[in-house]
Structure formats: C-alpha cells, structure tokens
Image (tube, rainbow, N blue to C red):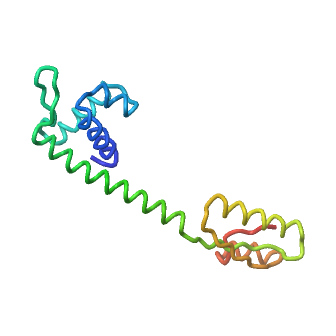
Amino acid sequence: MGLEGMEVFREFIVFARHLNVTKAADELHISPSTLSRHIGALERDIGMPVIEHNGSVLSLTPVGKLVLKTASTLVGEYTSLLEQVARYKRDASYVVRMSYALDDRTIIDAVSLVKMRLKKTYGGFNIQPVRMRGRGAYQALLNGAVDVVVA
C-alpha cells in the first residue's frame, strides 16, 4: 500500500465515524460502491475483516479498531508533514542569478517585471542581478554562472 493507501485510511476514518457506507460516501463525495470496494481492498491487504455486520448494524471488529487507531495517527502525521512542507516552501528563499544589459531601459524594465512576477508567483525568490553585455551573458548562461539571461 503506497500513498494511495493514505486516502483509503482517510476514507476508513470517515466510515468509522458514521458506521454507515452511504453517509460516509456522501461526505467523501464518492459512491457507496467505491467506498465498499476500498474497504474490501483494505481488508484483503490486512488479511482480516475490519467491519462486522449484525443484521443491518455495522460495527468495527477489534482489528478494525486497531486499523482506525493506526490510520488516525498516520493520517495526522502525514497531514502535519504536508503542512510543514507548505510552510517550508512559503518561507524558503531561492536565489536566481539574472544577467542583463545595464544600459538598455527596456531590458531594465523587463527585469523588474520578471522579478515582481517571480516573487508574486513563488514567494521567497531572491533575484541577484549580474550585469553583463552581449556574448558574455550568453556564455555565463552556458557555463552555469547565471540562471536567466534577459537580452
């Protein structure tokens, strides 16, 4: 079970809260048959039933309760990881080395627009201007001395 298993765990947690396939499927915006199929796949992966049927009443088996406890922990940790990565991405600072010709007003305006767009789109960008002319800028790009050339 890979990362798709995380979604099955989320579905199982919602099912366990309702103990009703139709209500859980409605909350998850999937069909009841899809939810039932996913729970069946979970049972096959585990090798034991997680749900027991007592007439029309559904309940979790002891293994189902163990799966619920573990799934809740895993989903919580995974959600926390995604939040931490999002914060890291938001707070990260990336350096982009941009080469351009200093004496051309149009290029200077274009560089300013590029800088604003990068910062707006990606957040923590730090643009380091590298002033060069002609073939020197192109050669710097080829050699990896700069990341972007505006010419």
Quadrant assignment for the C terminus = bottom right
In the image, 26: left or right of 131? left
What percent of the width, then of the height, locates residue 66?
15, 46
Give me the residue at 16% from left, 20% from top: 56
25 w.r.t. 45: above or below: above
Give me the residue at 74% from left, 78% from top: 130
In the image, 122: left or right of 34? right
Q: Quadrant of residue 22?
A: top left
Q: Residue furthest top?
A: 55
Give me the residue at 88% from left, 66% from top: 106
What percent of the width, then of the height, locates residue 30?
38, 29
In the image, 25: left or right of 125? left
143 or 25, which lies in front?
25
Q: Quadrant of residue 138?
A: bottom right
What percent of the width, then of the height, locates residue 64?
15, 40
Give me the residue at 79% from left, 79% from top: 132
9 or 4, which lies in front?
9
85 w.r.t. 44: above or below: below
